[in-house]
Image (cartoon, coloured by chain):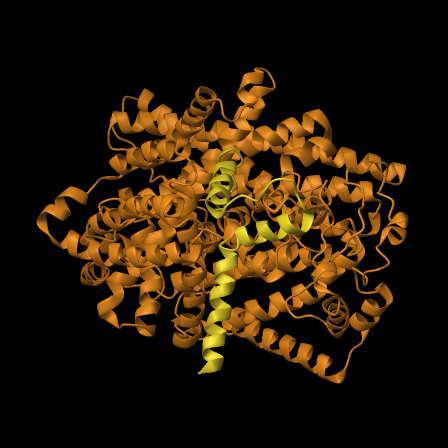
């Protein structure tokens, strides 16, 4: 454990009977720095296409802009960011060494630590980080027009989000797959580590609660949705039993069966919702669904993994890859024309109906997962690092995987802005503003004075009919809007208008599936964190198999997110528009915490010259989230500041008013006072904890800089006995070395690092 | 036609390993390479063990 682990001994430790486990440094350098005319031509072409696409998206102000330019702008920027910026991070900051064995090699156990093919692990990691977040955040952010969101999603991922994922994964890999919490404790000491742990726990509760709120809003008063999403439970149970008792290990087979049943549930949902008894039985209000979800969440989290969580995870992964490939194909084939302005009327105001607050900082927190997501730090540390085959592959898996997620966010944005703006605002504004009927909603939308928006009640009623819903008014949360946009694009690709209702419910289904998996897994992870923390005082709690402890901690976690969920569902102010900023702030505060830990690690490694690579995204995330928190805490504007709103309602109540703003009764006013107080204090706790973590990290970094480096906590270097290429396509030098390995006799080639 | 079948098989194999369908094969490979005293777990035992270990070691899923 000395300073930076001694790499000098690594060379002598290599097995002389085997080919080298790494491409020779000088050969690789020469290969990377050799610019052939074809290579130069390729990168010039990519840069030019990207420049033209950005020009079309950002500067040309025609009537419409074609969606294909968003795709080109995104993909070209990703390619350049990946090829050049992530290469800089690799070469100067992280310096991976393929002569060193990864945890999957030196800790190999055939179960948790398994060397995994880089392309498989890429998909695996992507499926673990991508969920409903990048799908709904950009939809909500579209209130401000398409350009601010597009720029932040694309530029933010290259300079911040993908950098965070890459650093966290690399440092966790060098530490045998340790979690972010353990790394924080090691690098920042007791105070910083404890603050990071509490902050992570609270942030997880908020994130789970608001994801659940998105599902509730999508399923409320929708018999079709309730039926088909409800059917995922028996389908998953059947799959679990099938895998456990009937045909163990036939994962693909059961996934295909599950997928077919899922499609049947969506189609059947339409038929069931069409019958009188079906419509009556599955027509549930939001509060009932929220309670159902809370009870479900508790049961799902204490059931064994094999019965519900694992099979639904298979379904969710299957759907995720399928949906994303299909959506990308559809956008490229259909190429919808976008009529939404680059900057909407709400870009310069702070009282937008979808989410409140000014563009800076609230746009940056609302996009959430597509550009920078702290939650990824929890995935990038722990699971994936235990599966990586070679150190150099982290760039492809972590940085590349995050670029893919950003691309999903761009596609969600395109889907959301391809629908009429009038419909967008009618769907996403709270009920208190739209009034709930097509007539009142149309009147309200037209009264906003938006350019080129003139919606009639007929259009709103027809859209609801097209997608097989009773109403689309005030279906906030992002998921229904995305589903309408996706149905609109997909029906042009496959099936025509007759299939719109199917595609709508298909979209609702996969979003619900992702979210339910995240809710279930989040509850479990949070429960273990809580058990572990209580275990420091009552050792019995550390035993994961002690049922009463597990149930008690699960109940506490479910009660915590359930309370926030019920608060959001019953909020007279609309729920999503007050709570979604809290979700975004929580997620990015976690990102700031992760980056702060990385900053301390980089400083201790002694690479001061390239510290800015971490410092820039950290500074940005810290400024955005702390400013957003301060707005939420101190803003005198009731629409923005929780406490300002609290006081406004308290005063109204004291003045003897029986209704105020959107709260139409004394009980509703009291609810607003209670909710804003809770939300306000949560904001205070988050920001205080995060500031403590960031300050301790800065202190640790400062100390390390003054001392010229610090104590590292990497596992000792072990010489590697395997080789695999770093990226998607092997380079000529990698191919040559791979040839040497393949020429070995089989029994030598499969030789493992040995069992310890 | 052959190429299409090959491509499809490749894709199916990729999806399979993505979802972890080849976990038992990998376990056996590891087991035979390192050489243990007792016999390897059967497929049924392996999957039971794998799921049960996830109970006490949950993996996060992101938003």
* Count of marks overlaid on the render: 0
Q: Quadrant of residue A296?
A: top left
At 48% from the left and 61% from the top, the residue drawn is B15
Q: Quadrant of residue A156?
A: bottom right
At 72% from the left and 68% from the top, the residue drawn is A742
A365 and B15: which one is in front? B15
Chain letter, colour yellow in render: B
Q: Is residue B46 rendered to the left or right of residue A229?
A: right
Q: Is residue A61 visible?
A: no
Chain A drawing hue: orange
Q: Is residue A15 above or below residue A296?
A: below
Q: Is residue A701 above or below residue A332?
A: above
B24 and A361: which one is in front? B24
B2 and A601: which one is in front? B2
The location of residue A629, given as percent across then percent down, is 54, 37
Q: Is residue A641 rendered to the left or right of residue A606?
A: left
The location of residue B37, given as percent across then percent down, is 65, 40
Q: Which quarter of the figure is the C terminus of chain A placed in?
A: top right
The location of residue B18, given as percent across then percent down, is 51, 57
The location of residue A638, given as percent across then percent down, is 42, 35
């Amino acid at each position: 454990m000395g300073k930076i682990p001694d790499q000098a001994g690594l060379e002598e430790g290599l097995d002389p009977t085997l080919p080298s486990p790494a491409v020779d440094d000088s050969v690789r350098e020469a290969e990377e720095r050799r610019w052939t005319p074809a290579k130069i031509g390729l990168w010039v072409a990519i840069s030019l296409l990207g420049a033209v696409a950005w020009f079309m998206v950002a500067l040309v102000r025609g009537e419409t802009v074609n969606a294909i330019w968003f795709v080109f702008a995104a993909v070209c920027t990703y390619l350049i960011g990946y090829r050049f910026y992530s290469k800089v991070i690799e070469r100067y900051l992280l310096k991976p060494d393929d002569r060193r064995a990864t945890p999957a090699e030196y800790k190999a156990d055939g179960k948790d630590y398994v060397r995994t093919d880089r392309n498989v692990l890429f998909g695996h990691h992507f499926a673990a980080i991508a969920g409903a977040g990048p799908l709904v955040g950009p939809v909500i952010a579209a209130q401000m027009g398409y350009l601010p969101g597009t720029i932040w999603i694309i530029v933010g991922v290259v300079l911040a989000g993908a950098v965070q994922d890459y650093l966290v994964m690399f440092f966790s890999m060098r530490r045998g797959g340790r979690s972010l919490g353990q790394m924080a404790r090691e690098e920042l000491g007791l105070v910083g580590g404890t603050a990071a742990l509490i902050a992570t726990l609270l942030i997880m509760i908020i994130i789970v609660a608001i994801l659940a709120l998105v599902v509730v809003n999508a399923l409320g008063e929708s018999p079709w949705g309730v039926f088909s999403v409800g059917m995922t439970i028996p389908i998953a149970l059947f799959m679990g039993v099938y895998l456990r008792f009937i045909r163990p290990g036939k994962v693909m087979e059961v996934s295909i069966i599950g997928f077919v049943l899922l499609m049947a549930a969506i189609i059947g949902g339409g038929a069931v919702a069409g019958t009188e008894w079906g419509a009556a039985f599955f027509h549930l209000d939001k509060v009932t669904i929220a309670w159902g979800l809370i009870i479900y969440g508790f049961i799902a989290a204490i059931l064994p993994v094999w019965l519900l969580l694992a099979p639904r995870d298979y379904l969710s992964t299957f759907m995720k890859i399928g949906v994303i490939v299909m959506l990308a194909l559809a956008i490229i084939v259909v190429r919808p024309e976008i009529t939404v302005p680059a900057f909407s009327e709400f870009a310069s105001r702070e009282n937008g109906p979808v989410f409140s607050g000014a563009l800076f900082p609230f746009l940056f927190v609302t996009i959430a997962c597509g550009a920078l997501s702290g939650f990824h730090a929890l995935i990038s540390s722990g699971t994936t690092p235990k599966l990586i085959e070679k150190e150099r592959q982290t760039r492809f898996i972590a940085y590349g995987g995050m670029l893919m997620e950003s691309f999903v966010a761009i596609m969600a944005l395109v889907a959301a802005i391809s629908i009429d703006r009038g419909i967008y605002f009618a769907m996403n504004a709270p009920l208190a503003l739209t009034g709930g009927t097509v007539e009142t909603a149309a009147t309200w939308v037209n009264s906003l004075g938006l350019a080129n928006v003139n919606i009639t009640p007929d259009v709103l009623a027809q859209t609801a009919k097209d997608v097989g819903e009773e109403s689309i008014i005030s279906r906030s949360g992002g998921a229904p809007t995305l589903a309408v946009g996706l149905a609109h694009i997909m029906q042009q690709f496959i099936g025509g208008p007759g299939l719109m209702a199917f595609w709508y419910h298909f979209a609702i289904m996969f979003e619900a599936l992702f979210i339910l998996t995240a809710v279930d897994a989040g509850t479990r992870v949070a429960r273990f964190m809580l058990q572990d923390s209580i275990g420091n005082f009552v050792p019995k709690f550390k035993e994961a198999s002690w049922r009463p402890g597990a149930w008690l901690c699960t109940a506490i976690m479910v009660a915590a997110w359930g309370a926030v969920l019920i608060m959001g569902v019953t909020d007279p102010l609309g729920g999503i528009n007050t709570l979604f900023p809290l979700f975004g702030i929580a997620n990015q505060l976690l990102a700031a915490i992760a980056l702060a830990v990385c900053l301390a690690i980089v400083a201790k490694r002694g690479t001061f010259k390239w510290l800015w690579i971490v410092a820039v995204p950290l500074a940005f995330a810290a400024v955005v989230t702390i400013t957003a928190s301060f707005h939420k805490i101190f803003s005198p504007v009731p629409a923005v500041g929780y406490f300002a709103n609290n006081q406004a309602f308290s005063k109204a109540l004291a003045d003897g008013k029986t209704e105020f703003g959107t709260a139409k009764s004394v009980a509703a006013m009291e609810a607003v006072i209670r909710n804003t107080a809770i939300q306000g204090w949560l904001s205070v706790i988050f920001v205080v904890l995060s500031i403590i973590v960031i300050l301790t990290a800065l202190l640790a970094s400062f100390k390390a800089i003054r001392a010229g480096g610090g104590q590292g906590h990497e596992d000792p270097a072990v010489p590697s006995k395997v080789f695999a290429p770093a990226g998607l396509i092997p380079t000529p030098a990698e191919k040559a070395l791979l040839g040497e390995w393949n020429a070995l006799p089989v029994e030598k080639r499969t030789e493992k690092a040995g069992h310890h | 036609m052959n190429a299409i079948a090959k491509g499809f098989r490749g894709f199916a194999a990729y999806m399979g390993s993505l979802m972890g369908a080849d976990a038992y094969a990998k376990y056996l490979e590891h087991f035979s390479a390192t050489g243990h005293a007792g016999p390897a777990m059967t497929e049924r035992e392996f999957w039971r063990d794998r799921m049960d270990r996830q109970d006490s070691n949950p993996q996060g899923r992101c938003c």
